[in-house]
Amino acid sequence: MYDEEVRRVARAAMRAGESLNSISLRLGISRAALRSWRDQPDRAGVDDCPRCHGAALPGAAYAHLLGLYLGDGCLSLGKKSVYALRIACDDKYPRLIDEVVESVQAVHPRRPVHRARAVGYTSVVSCWKHWPCLFPQHGPGPKHLRPIELEDWQREIVASGIEPFVRGLFHSDGCRVANWATRPVAGEIRRYEYVRYMFSNESADIMALCQWALDQLGIPWRMPRRNALSVAKRDGVARLELIVGAKT
């Protein structure tokens, strides 16, 4: 695979009128590749990877997709070193499925995004050789059995898009629930209801990322269980109502 700088030099040479044979000999590029770049310029960068070529990623869409990937996503290797990114989505929430598709398309707009339907859920699928470049957390086995850490460039993107990241986390492994409690009022025991948000994940590292993101937003949380995080204080819930909201 030729990098973008080589393509840029080759295209400039072709525009200047240099022969394909001369460019091939000078740059070590096959004439077939040069003809493809000349005759199908719209496909010249079809496999360009922002990480490989130093291009910017769409921050909010990537932060959202990263949160989704850490929760319900995986990469699987197929033929010709092409990876399939799969985000599993509950069929009860069609709007969330549409939002996942939009984020995948924003991050990698050059390839189609598919919806693979199964019993009770839909997998949003996109195939690309470079998904591991964007999700270096990929590895063998379940996520909770291996270290999950953000690289510096990922943490920088997420830090500037904390809300989409939190939205992705809670849309994958979170829920919004109505709880109730009782308390004495004027000598009577009265029942009242309140909303709280829960996030559950078996990976201590992913849980720590959720805690870090909520801390950045100033949202208080507590851990009722080892693998469950709760946001129940009024101000924190109000903030998550704006960022996450009810699943639909």
Image (cartoon, rainbow, N blue to C red):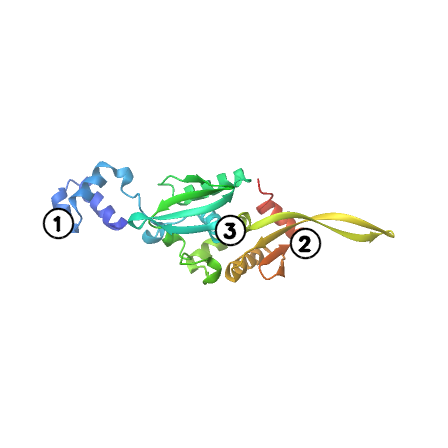
The residue that disc 2 covers is 233
In primary-sequence order, the first of circles 3 and 1 is 1
The residue that disc 3 covers is 165
Label 3: how many residues lie within 10 Å, few (<14), some (14-19) or many (20+)? Answer: many
In primary-sequence order, the first of circles 3 and 2 is 3
Rendered location of residue 118, percent (x, y): 47, 41
The residue that disc 1 covers is 25
Q: Secondary structure at mark 3?
A: helix
Q: Is residue 163 left or right of residue 33?
A: right
Q: Residue at x 16, y 44 (%)?
A: 31
| On-image quarter of the C terminus | top right
Label 1: how many residues lie within 10 Å, few (<14), some (14-19) or many (20+)? Answer: few
Q: Secondary structure at mark 2?
A: loop
Rendered location of residue 27, percent (x, y): 17, 51
Q: Marks 3 and 1, how far apart in space?
A: 47 Å
Give the amino acid at mark 2: Lys
Q: Marks 2 and 1, how far apart in space?
A: 68 Å
Q: Is residue 235 left or right of residue 202?
A: right
Location of residue 123 by image quarter: top left
Q: Secondary structure at mark 1?
A: helix
Give the amino acid at mark 3: Phe
Q: Residue at x 61, y 52 (%)?
A: 198
- Name the residue nearer the viewer: 124 or 163: 124
- Name the residue nearer the viewer: 173 or 103: 173
Rendered location of residue 18, percent (x, y): 14, 42
In primary-sequence order, the first of circles 2 and 1 is 1
Q: Residue at x 59, y 57 (%)?
A: 228
Instruction: Please say if the residues under marks 3 and 2 sit with CB atoms less than 8 Å apart.
Output: no
Q: Nearer the viewer, mark 3 or mark 1?
A: 3
Q: Is residue 135 left or right of residue 1?
A: right
